[in-house]
Structures are given as structure tokens and as C-alpha cells.
Amino acid sequence: MRGRGAGPYLEAMDAPALVLASASPRRRALLEQIGVPHVVLPVAVDETPRPGEAPEVLVLRLALAKARAGASQAPGRVALGADTVVVLDGRPLGKPAGREEAVAMLCALGGRTHAVMSAVALTDGEREATRLSVSHVRFRPVGREEAEAYWATGEPRDKAGGYAIQGLGAVFVEHLEGSYSGVMGLPLHETAELLRAFGIPVWRKRA
């Protein structure tokens, strides 16, 4: 993690080095929740969907691209990449570009069920593996005035679909079928499976 020095930190944890190829504080917190030591290495990849690309293909492709980018900058370590997309009527909803788009997204999600697809990928530069988690979230109806008030809180600005289930946006959720951590951005069941396959244990004690 930034500010501690990757080498000494990982030695103190007595665990294989894992690179989180993401700047997301939510993914960092989720890895910490299950006791996985890691260093943060944000990467930049082009997240533009390809013509006709299915949402599940998009999210898996981007997670793997992020993992590969992280591994290329940290030879000898295992890199984890993840990506999340909200899907309504078969159309992926990314992060809102601004207030109007965020309000429109939230109003469109209101009173309906949408899918949240979260992919996680690991690579050590030689081996690669991916997993996909699909959850279904039902919102209560949301009016424009409430959506605008939510935008004013600042929370929706960097969230897929324009909301955070772990934050203030939780008030919109009537029902969740699937992975809560997946909706947050990192499905922990699938992540733990991949980590074990790469020799990285969970539930490590913190230094």
C-alpha cells in the first residue's frame, strides 16, 4: 500500500506479494476485510466498449487488461484487476459523466431490477485466470428531486450506475440477489478462489 514501502510491508506480512491494479478505495477495503496483504498500483486502461460487445465480455476483458497492466509494472508479483458494470435492459451503465446523466441513470433504475456484473482477474505474467459475479438489484421508485439530492452528496460521481450500495445509495435498494461485495466492486467469493489458486491465502494477520 502506498506510503509504507512495498518490500518491507510485504515481508512483515510474510505473504506472497499481491498488486491491486486499481485506485478504488472500496476494492482496497474489501481485500483488507478478508485479510489479504497487498500493494496498490493504479493503472490506466481504455474502458471503451467494443461495437456489439456483451456486458459480461466487456467486464471480463477490462478486469484482465487491468491485471495485465499491473503485472507489467510489477514483475514477479501477482496482479489483481477488477471491473464492475451496471446493466439495464442489456445496456451497460458506466460512471456518470455529469449531473444530468447521473440523475437520468438513477431515475431509470428506479422501480426496476438491474444486473451488476463484477469481474476479477489475476495474473503473474504467465498464468491468467478470471471469474465473473452477476447480481440482481431491485430499486424502489426514485424521483428526479431525490436523484438530484443524491447527486449533490457527491457520492455517485465515480460509481458504476451512479450509486454506491455501501453508502448513501443503500436507501434505494429493495432487494439484492447475489453478491453484496460484487455490487461494491470486488466479489469476495470469486476473489478468494483465485487468490488460493495463485498461492495467496486469505485471513492473514495484519502487522
Image: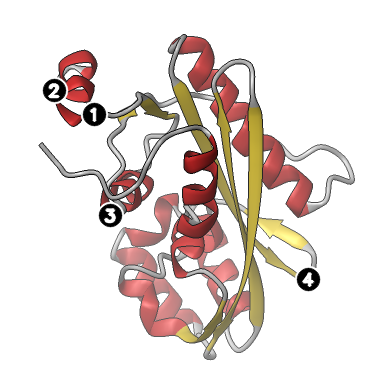
Disc 4/disc 3 C-alpha distance (Å): 33 Å
Is residue 101 depicted above or below 141 in this figure? Answer: above
Quadrant (top left, top right, bottom left, bottom right) of the N terminus: top left
Q: In this figure, which residue is indicated by the disc labeled 3?
A: 33
* Alpha carbons under labels 2 and 4: distance apart: 44 Å
Tell which tag, 3 or 1, sits nearer the viewer: 3
Checking the image for residue 89, the label placed there is: 4
Amino acid type, label 2: Arg
How packed mark 1 is, by other alpha carbons closer than 10 Å (few <14, some 14-19, many 20 or more), is: some
Q: Are marks 4 and 3 in contact (CB under 8 Å)?
A: no
Residue at 43% x, 12% y is 74
**Up-down relation of residue 144 to residue 174 (above or below):** above
Sequence-earlier tag: 3 or 2: 2
Q: Amino acid at mark 3?
A: Gln
Asked whether residue 142 is in view, the answer is: yes
- Mark 3: give few (<14), some (14-19) or many (20+) Cα within 10 Å: few
Q: Which of labels 4 and 3 is toward the front?
A: 3
Q: CA distance from mark 3 to mark 1?
A: 15 Å
Comparing labels 3 and 2, the label whose residue is closer to the camera: 3
**x, y percent for residue 57:** 78, 46
Mark 1 and mark 2: span between their CA atoms?
6 Å
Q: Which residue is under mark 2?
A: 4
Helix, strand or loop for disc 1 = loop
**Residue matched to label 1:** 1
**Circle 1: residue type:** Met
Three-letter amino acid code at the position of disc 4: Asp
Q: Name which of mark 3 and mark 1 comes first in the sequence.
A: 1
Q: SS class of the residue under badge 3?
A: helix
Q: Are marks 4 and 1 in contact (CB under 8 Å)?
A: no
Image point 28% across, 50% down: which residue? 203
- Label 4: state its secondary structure: loop
User: Is residue 29 depicted above or below 171 in this figure?
Assistant: above
